[in-house]
Image (cartoon, rainbow, N blue to C red):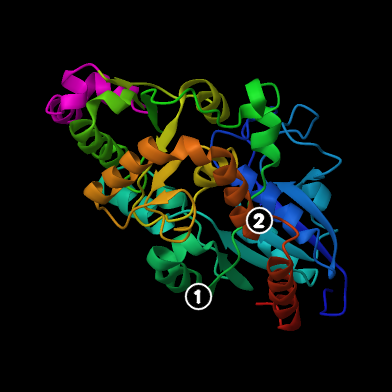
Amino acid sequence: MATPSSLLRIGITIGLHHPAETLWNNGIKQNAVFLAEALKHCPNVASVTLVNTTSIEISDALPWDLKRWPTRSYEQAKDSVDVMIELGGQLDANQTDYIKRRGGRLISYCCGTEYVHMMEAILFDKPAGGSNLFINQRYDDIWMVPQVDHISRSYFEVFRHHKARSVPFVWSPVFIEQRSADLPHGGVYQPRGAGQAKRLTVLEPNINVVKFCLYPILIAEEAFRAAPDRIELLQVTNVLGLAEKNMDFIALMNQLDIVRQHKAVFLGRYDTPQFLAQNTDVVVSHQWENPLNYVYLETCWQGYPLVHNASLCPDLGYYYTDHNVSEGAAQLLKVFAEHDQVANAYRLRQRELISRYLPGHAAMTQHYVQLLNEVVSKPAR
């Protein structure tokens, strides 16, 4: 049984769907690894294990170091975990009961805009569990990354019968640097020459309303109207299906000067580190109710200018407020005029600012120590 004086054995759930599943198809597995790395720095933690809740076998085919981040199945881990953090794979009612009967604690770690996902599932007939939906109401705590607090807190609290709290956001450059190691200059931004027109990249996934490409395109359009000679190409990724088949999207795009003058391309999915290194001078971004994201940190860590509206990290990159396209375009024009002269200093400053999110940051570590102590000091639900 875990107590505040115990060294805690932590499990963090993942849900594998393939023995060699990539880290880059979504941020959830990265989130699990980053949280594991952060909790390893806590003096009240004895061990941290990634716990797979699916039937996929754990093997060396996984894209992370199994010695650095031990990974086991639920059956292998269930008797050696004091606190289970449900992050990327859900425990069912029987598994929950087993953990509880052993005296363990169960934490729901929420890192997605679940209210939006469920809203879209209902409105647009995109199944999200249906009659098989299981909402666990026995969590001992609910932890949310800060970017989902504003829109999803009440959704979590009412359905899960427990107060939720915002916890420190964690990120590490370990995977972006690993993936960029064989790229020229380690994938770090390199100015291409004074006065050279810029290649703009939009990386929004375009799978829901939270991160959609339209406003970044409009920012590029306004900048193009003001300084057409400063833009070589606008590249919009993760949008090929819409560009080929969605008549509303096609009709809107055909209204734009940057499209009519053949300075825009609409592409499929790409590997982010490689696309940054080989195709990108500036990243233009927009989000709605998700103001902190791994791609912002990846972009800024590697020194690429980022034009964005992420209000939880306004000191990173080139920030514009809310949905203000004109302000975003002004920031983009500022990048054209100034960035390459300060590129090295910018990258160093971005890394200094991002240090607050890195595992081992003193304030973050102390916060997680306190959170864990509070969870195990209360009776299990």
Between 95 and 59, the one lying in front of the other is 59
Between 381 and 309, the one lying in front of the other is 309
Q: Main secondary structure of the magenta part?
A: helix
- Bounds of the magenta segment: 236-262
Residue 316 is left or right of residue 176, and the answer is left
Instruction: Quadrant for the N terminus, please.
Output: bottom right
Instruction: Quadrant for the C terminus, please.
Output: bottom right
Q: Amino acid at mark 2?
A: Ser
For label 2, the SS is helix
For label 1, the SS is loop
Snapshot quadrant of residue 334: top left
- Answer above or below: position of 232 versus 292: above
Of marks 2 and 1, which one's residue comes earlier in the chain?
Answer: 1
Name the residue carrying label 2.
355
Q: Position of residue 146 (x, y in %)?
A: 51, 64
What mark, if any, has residue 161 been given in the picture?
1
Q: Residue furthest top?
A: 262
Determine if residue 205 is in view: no
Between 268 and 133, the one lying in front of the other is 268
